[in-house]
Image (cartoon, rainbow, N blue to C red):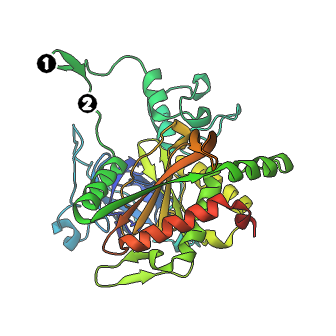
Amino acid sequence: MNVLMPQLGETVTEGTIAKWYKAVGDTIAAGDILFEIETDKTSMEVPALAGGILAEIRAQKGQTVPVNAVICVITADGKVPAEAATAAPAPVKSAPAAATAAPAPQPVAAAPAVKRDIDPFNSVQTPAKNFGKATLPSGAKITPLARRLAAEAGVDLGTLQGSGPHGRIVAADIKRAQPAQAAAPQTAAGNAYREIPLDGMRRTIAKRLVESKQTVPHFYLSTDVSVEALLALRQQINTLTPKRISVNDFIVKAYALALQKVPAANAIWAEDKLLQYERSDVGVAVAIEGGLITPVVRSADMKSLATISAEIADLAKRARERKLKPAEYQGGTGTVSNLGMYGIRQFSAIVNPPQATILAVGAAERRPEETEDGGIRFASKLTVTLSVDHRVVDGAVAGELLAALRTIVENPLSLLL
């Protein structure tokens, strides 16, 4: 039986072997974990679907191989079939610095190909038992990559203070805790530097952003939106419920409703056609260790603010732990990217194909404005910038979408109906 590199999402084309749990010659039972893979989105374990003996390993730890490439071969007698022996090994994108030949299979007693009941639709699992739990007794969270690095380096996670969001322990914390054994920094033009290898996520982000800017005809529209009424309503809601609603929750809901009011903008590019959707599936940009991911709030136009808030919090938490399922970050009819919490007043985001729009949200701030009698007063406003794929949405439609968004945000009671 050939074990292939699984595809963990529509946009995932390759995976990196992070660890082998079995060696050539080992007896395998159905359900035994064979190896762990890391993609640009997640880290997962791959089990055997049938029993036998591991006869051949074609991709070593650290190698990046394409989806559906043969990773290893399991047979009943531990011998590599003639056709498999002559087949080319799994193609790799990068090889480890010091590759060693896989050990030759040792003569062992033939094991029957025993199967046991497992669910093939849940055959890829998140590694938890091999590198410890994701939460320490103190309550501190650890990312999957940090758990693996700590296990390999022998670092005691209980002694670390996490530098990630909400005190999360990230890979950088593990690297700082390890003994100073890294190679000395190199120097160029008198300035020292260290090389940082690109992981799968960063490579994928770079590739998709370059493709988007080179192939998608972007244009941008900005407008200032008053949030006086929205902030007042948010304060009232948050005094009545322990679950706090954020400004971003309001914006996501408002954007979903605006897409409903302008259905021509609730569409995506499908090469030879446009797909216009009935519901508003809104992606929310979430910064995670090593990159960015946009989990999707499905049918956001139909959900309450409290539901949207809870869903975003859950998606963001699991995104940072790299536990999202592909269906949770794929698709979407538009995206909201908010940098207001960093004090950014205004920015332009890059469209995430095949989506046609992405809304960049800046910080709410007090700004002067002229009153009807010619005086000056200060009001709370924020700037939003809509990035648009001109192949799908024209300027007038994009302007209509922003106008609809501004009307909804400035009259926030409609978000409660």
* Apparent side of residue 8 relative to residue 103 in the rendered image (left or right): right
Q: Secondary structure beneath disc 2? A: loop
Marks 2/1 in contact by CB < 8 Å: the verdict is no
Which residue corresponds to mark 1? 189
Toward the viewer: 265 or 9?
A: 265
Find residue 77 and name its label.
Answer: none
Q: Residue furthest bottom?
A: 273
Give how far across and how far down residue 350 sits, in percent.
36, 56
Quarter occupied by residue 198: top left
Q: Residue at x 23, y 65 (%)?
A: 215
Toward the viewer: 352 or 326?
A: 352
Quarter occupied by residue 416: bottom right
Quarter occupied by residue 2: bottom left
Q: Is residue 176 above or below residue 128?
A: above
Q: Residue at x 42, y 82 (%)?
A: 275
Q: Quadrant of the N terminus?
A: bottom left
Give how far across and how far down residue 146 sits, in percent.
49, 37
Q: Is residue 41 above or below residue 100?
A: below
Which residue corresponds to mark 2? 195
Q: Is residue 263 above or below residue 378?
A: below
In the image, which is nearer the foreground, mark 2 or mark 1? 1
